[in-house]
Image: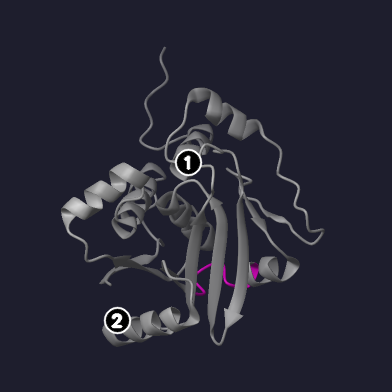
Amino acid sequence: MPRRQSKTLTKAELRKMNVLWLKGSGTVQLILDFLSQKPPMASNGHSRSRRTPELREVTFVDHASRELWASIIGKKVNLVPYSTATSEYRREVEDKIRQRYEITGPLAFLHVNLIDDQSESLSPLRIRVLQEGENFVIEGWGAVAIANSIGYLSELLDPISIVLGLTRRNMMQKSLNYLLSGQGEVGLLVYSILVRHWVFANRTASHPLIFLMSQ
């Protein structure tokens, strides 16, 4: 008899979906290669991988980053992906967030950098975490797709909330950017990726609140 269709994905199916979620797209062989690869060795002896049941894809640049990351997992911070990696810009964004939303607790600013050669689909994400006053600054290198990487890191971090910025470019500019770079409106893409993943994973509770903020 054929197997009864389940409303939720099996563990094996979730592993494959996580690869597509992180990479954006991929052939069957790419998925198999990714799932069978060994954790990358870090050049720094203190670097360790943040391992999950599905993927071994995140490495830390140093021991301090690994320890700070561990200290903010599980509803400890509000995640704020941003595009301009300066302290002045972070202060400006924090002021807007505190004025517009009733958000308590520290902010974790996340800046993700694309890998130079985006054909390197199996490259790991390298993460650095710093503390800045009561807030935290997370920087990632080696992303193939910014929105997918933000969504993946958000699921690992499990924040209280996520504040996603929306640009003021018109739809023609957004569409052109998507065609040329594949990035598009990052805030909306992250939202779409997360909601789709929560549906696939049958996660109906405990996921973070999402705020959309015009930049």
Q: Residues within 10 Å of mark 1 (few under 14, many from 20)?
A: many
Tell whether label 2 touches label 1 (CB within 8 Å): no
First-in-chain label (1 vs 2): 1
Label for residue 101? 2
Label for residue 183? none
Judge whether residue 103 can be spotted in this image: no
Judge whether residue 69 can be spotted in this image: yes
Dividing the picture into quarters, in which one does residue 38 lie? top right
Range of residues picked out in magenta: 70-77
In the foreground, 20 or 77: 20
Badge count: 2
Residue shown at the point (76%, 47%) measured from the top left? 41
Q: Which residue is mark 1?
A: 23
**Quick check: 139 left or right of 82?**
right
In the foreground, 178 or 206: 178
Location of the C terminus (image quadrant): bottom left
Residue depth check, mark 1 versus mark 2: number of the one nearer the observer: 1
SS of the residue under disc 2 = loop
**Quick check: 172 left or right of 163?**
left
- Residue 71 magenta-highlighted: yes
Dividing the picture into quarters, in which one does residue 122 lie? top right
Q: CA distance from mark 1 to mark 2?
A: 32 Å
Picture coordinates of residue 202 (x, y %)? 38, 46
Which residue is the extreme one toward the right? 45
SS of the residue under disc 1 = helix
Q: Residues within 10 Å of mark 2 (few under 14, many from 20)?
A: few
Circle 1: residue type = Lys
In the foreground, 75 or 169: 169
Main SS type for the magenta part? loop
Picture coordinates of residue 13 (x, y %)? 48, 33
Picture coordinates of residue 195 (x, y %)? 33, 51
Q: Is residue 97 above or below residue 12?
A: below
